[in-house]
């Protein structure tokens, strides 16, 4: 679509145009890009004010803030793109504190030559993701770097949310006897991205599980207010997240491999590629730790929500000075589920 | 795709474990060397050794091509990237192995050397086509499983006149390694390393067939059971080995019949024979000089031999002091016997290749069994 506007001398060609250095220079071209793309798609009062910042009343309660840089490659993958990922990822970071997400910011670093059509696709996707989640993108920034100095587009998103009264989640609160729950099958996102990156075609198309988890969290917190902590297993997968929590809380964990859900096509793809699903990134899953006695109630609340239908209790927290995460294998043997050494899949989110 | 869970069923594992417990004679020990690093990994990942009775023990063998590559040969690869400005294509596992001065290819890459991870030889060929003004070298490692693809790449490059492509050949051979292990003083004379039977490698055997192992079974009077990679395969093969030992047999048996045949993949064997020939001797990390245990590129394809093209000289380099990789590779020591293990040497800071490679015994121990204090029931 060619946008002609009296305020701007030329037209911006969103179909065939590309990002050039003037789009980041602070001048008219940049203002035009912001107007035609960002403001038009994100479309809210605060953004339309056109200030460098957005001002809002602080709601009562404890505030939560989180930030994420997104460098995923490829930009478009089965089940999402860098835009929707940015929205979901930041909403989820806020949600893991038990908080309701309110506002997002979006900073773009664009590479000279990046097609405006692709940029519009990303921004539209972001706007749609934000709209569905009931969260607004109220401020942002645009910079352009020379060709070769950036990989198409990088996005930094920051989120602000508010924690309901009485909710106090933290990764250092796990105690021996607590139950460990997982909201659904693991490995979807990492495999979806890799399949696109390596031009590997599987008979079933595996989609990224990228999704905003805040409404699931709200249901969980309501059912079990004395939840200990939540965390979403993104880079490094479930294994890394559990090791982080174990270390933070100074406890060990005992898992059952049989209880951990993995989709058959994801499991098959992992076998093919030599990946362990435990270490593969997820973008629409969470790990919850709660008092043992509350496990069944929490599981029921999770399964009642669309994003938690395949939730499972996967293990329990135990006393362990070494903070090892151990797992009973399918066969009944024992193994450690260690931190990831090195890198499994680069630039997965 | 099927066959993901079928060979990991708990009930079948239980019944195999029960059979092993029943048939393993209590008055003797059974030491079974799993030659292949992939088996080591499978055993640890699924906790197979937890299902074995006390007197059935796995001895980890040298079948990890990353682990047996000497430091000097990795230095050669680094030289290609750094001194000759070639694009060096390598499998992922090689990137983190520490070479001289404990520098790895990954670190050389961070310092500016053009080192690229590839999944297959075809990726390297593509890079050569896409970068005609650069030299592209494929760092070829592996046992007989990866040798045929290298042969294909060499033939294709020759046929396409890809003059900027070459191969740095470090392929090694399984039968030679097994012989060397069995002829080592610890096994032959001193008897300090007991090896009663072998679990033979799965995919190597799909290429070479089961025939080459008939020699060992006969000459060294030890059962060889070719085993698949799944945990149930390993357990069934172990049971087959125990039965052979109990019955005083020493034959080659094929547990992995769904993939492996006696003759193997003739087409692949012919391809390899066309392109490669035996090196009279080649240094293996841990095993020393092994006669006729490695391959080099034949004269007809010598134009694609990186060692010739770049006049590479790979002098022998000693291992890090205190690193017990050589003993561990031969089954003489366990990873926990090494003084560096878990203290200085971890996957994040590896001293030797056994800790870096996903198939290395030390990496397997660290990653999957570290929770056992020394002195607890050892694997």
Image (cartoon, coloured by chain):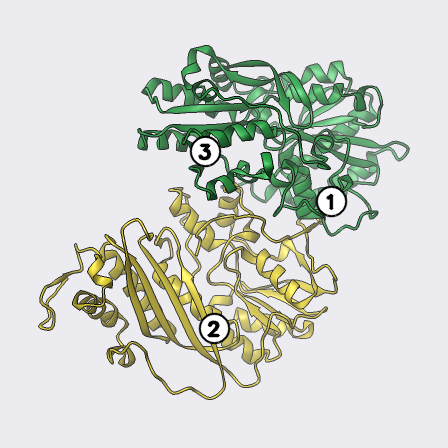
Q: Measuring from the top left, give residue A149's x and y in whole percent.
A: 32, 51
Numbered circle sitting on residue B222: none
Q: Measuring from the top left, give residue A255's x and y in whole percent.
A: 66, 58
Mark 2 and mark 1: span between their CA atoms?
45 Å
| SS state under label 1 | helix
Q: Earlier in the sequence, mark 1 or mark 3?
A: 1
Instruction: State which chain disc 3 sits on.
Output: B
* Crowd tier of the residue under label 3, counting other residues whose Cα lies within 10 Å: few below 14, some 14–19, many 20 or above: some
Instruction: State which chain disc 2 sits on.
Output: A
* Crowd tier of the residue under label 2, counting other residues whose Cα lies within 10 Å: few below 14, some 14–19, many 20 or above: many
| SS state under label 3 | helix
In the rendered image of the structure, the colour used to display chain A is: yellow
Q: Residue furthest top?
A: B299
Q: Which residue is mark 1?
A: B14
Q: Is residue A211 at least partly visible in the picture?
A: no
Quadrant that contains the C terminus of chain B = top right
Q: Which residue is mark 3?
A: B82
Instruction: Kindly indicate whether the residues beneath marks 2 and 1 are on one polypeptide chain.
Output: no
Q: Please state which of residues A156 and A252 is positioned toward the viewer in this rendering.
A: A156
| SS state under label 2 | helix
Query: What chain is colored green?
Result: B
Nearest-to-viewer mark from 1 and 3 = 3
**Left or right of A25, for residue A227:** right
Q: Which residue is mark 2?
A: A94
Where A151 sits versus B12, above or below? below
Q: Is residue A111 at least partly visible in the picture?
A: yes
Q: Measuring from the top left, give residue A9's x and y in whole percent.
A: 9, 67
* Crowd tier of the residue under label 1, counting other residues whose Cα lies within 10 Å: few below 14, some 14–19, many 20 or above: some
Nearest-to-viewer mark from 3 and 2 = 3
Mark 3 and mark 2: span between their CA atoms?
46 Å
Instruction: State which chain disc 1 sits on.
Output: B
């Amino acid at each position: 679509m060619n946008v002609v506007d009296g305020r701007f001398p030329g037209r911006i060609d969103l179909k065939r145009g590309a990002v050039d250095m003037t789009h980041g220079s602070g001048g008219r071209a940049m203002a035009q890009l912001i107007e035609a793309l960002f403001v038009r798609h994100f479309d809210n009062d605060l953004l339309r004010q056109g200030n460098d910042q957005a001002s809002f009343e602080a709601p009562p309660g404890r505030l939560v803030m989180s930030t994420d840089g997104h460098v995923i490659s490829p930009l478009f993958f089965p089940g999402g793109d860098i835009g929707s990922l940015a929205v979901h990822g930041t909403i989820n970071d806020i949600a893991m504190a038990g908080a309701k997400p309110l506002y997002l910011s979006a900073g773009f670093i664009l590479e000279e030559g990046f097609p405006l059509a692709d940029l519009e696709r990303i921004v539209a996707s972001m706007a749609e993701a934000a709209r569905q989640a009931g969260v607004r993108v109220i401020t942002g920034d645009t910079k352009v770097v020379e060709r070769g100095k950036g990989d198409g587009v990088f996005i930094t998103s920051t989120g602000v949310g508010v924690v309901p009264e009485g909710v106090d989640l933290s990764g250092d609160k796990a105690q021996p006897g607590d139950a460990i729950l997982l909201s659904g099958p693991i490995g979807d996102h990492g495999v979806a991205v890799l399949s696109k990156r390596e031009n590997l075609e599987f008979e079933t198309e595996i989609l990224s599980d990228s999704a905003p988890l805040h409404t699931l969290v709200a249901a969980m917190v309501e059912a079990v207010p004395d939840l200990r902590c939540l965390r979403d297993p993104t880079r490094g997968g479930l294994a890394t997240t559990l090791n982080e929590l174990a270390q933070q809380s100074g406890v060990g964990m005992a898992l059952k491999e049989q209880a951990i859900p993995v989709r058959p096509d994801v499991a098959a793809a992992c076998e093919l590629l030599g990946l362990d699903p435990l270490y593969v990134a997820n973008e629409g899953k969470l790990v919850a730790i709660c008092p043992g006695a509350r496990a069944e109630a929490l599981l029921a609340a999770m399964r009642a929500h669309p994003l938690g239908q395949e939730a499972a209790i996967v293990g329990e927290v135990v006393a362990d000075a070494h903070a090892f995460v151990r797992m009973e294998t399918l066969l009944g043997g024992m193994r450690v589920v260690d931190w990831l050494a090195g890198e499994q899949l680069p630039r997965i989110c | 795709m099927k066959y993901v869970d079928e060979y990991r069923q708990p009930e079948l594992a239980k019944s195999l474990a029960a059979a092993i417990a029943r048939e393993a004679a209590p008055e003797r020990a059974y030491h079974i060397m799993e030659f292949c690093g992939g088996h080591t990994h499978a055993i640890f990942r699924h906790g197979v050794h937890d299902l074995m009775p006390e007197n059935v023990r796995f001895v980890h063998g040298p079948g990890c091509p990353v682990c047996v590559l000497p430091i000097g040969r990795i230095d050669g690869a680094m030289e290609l990237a750094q001194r000759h400005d070639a694009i060096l294509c390598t499998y992922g596992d090689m990137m983190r192995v520490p070479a001289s001065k404990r520098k790895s290819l990954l670190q050389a890459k961070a310092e500016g050397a053009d080192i690229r991870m590839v999944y297959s030889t075809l990726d390297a060929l593509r890079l050569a086509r896409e970068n005609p003004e650069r030299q592209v070298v494929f760092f070829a490692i592996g046992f007989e499983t990866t040798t045929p693809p290298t042969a294909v790449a060499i033939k294709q490059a020759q046929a396409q006149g890809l003059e900027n492509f070459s191969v740095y050949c470090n392929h090694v051979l399984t039968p030679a390694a097994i012989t060397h292990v069995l002829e080592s003083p610890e096994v032959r004379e001193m008897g300090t390393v007991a090896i009663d039977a072998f679990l033979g490698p799965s995919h190597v055997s799909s290429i070479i067939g089961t025939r080459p192992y008939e020699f060992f079974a006969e000459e060294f009077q030890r059962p060889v059971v070719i085993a698949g990679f799944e945990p149930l395969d390993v357990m069934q093969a172990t049971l087959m080995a125990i039965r052979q030992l109990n019955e005083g047999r020493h034959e080659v048996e094929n547990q992995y019949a769904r993939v492996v045949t006696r003759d193997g993949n003739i087409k692949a064997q012919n391809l390899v024979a066309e392109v490669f020939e035996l090196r009279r001797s080649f240094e293996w990390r841990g095993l020393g000089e092994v006669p006729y245990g490695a391959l080099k590129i034949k004269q007809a394809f010598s134009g694609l031999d990186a060692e010739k093209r770049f006049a590479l000289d790979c002098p022998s380099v000693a291992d890090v002091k205190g690193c017990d990789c050589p003993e561990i590779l031969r089954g003489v020591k366990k990873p926990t016997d090494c003084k560096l293990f878990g203290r200085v040497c971890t996957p994040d800071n590896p001293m030797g290749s056994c800790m870096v490679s996903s198939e290395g015994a030390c990496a397997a121990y660290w990653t999957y069994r570290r929770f056992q204090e020394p002195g607890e029931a050892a694997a």
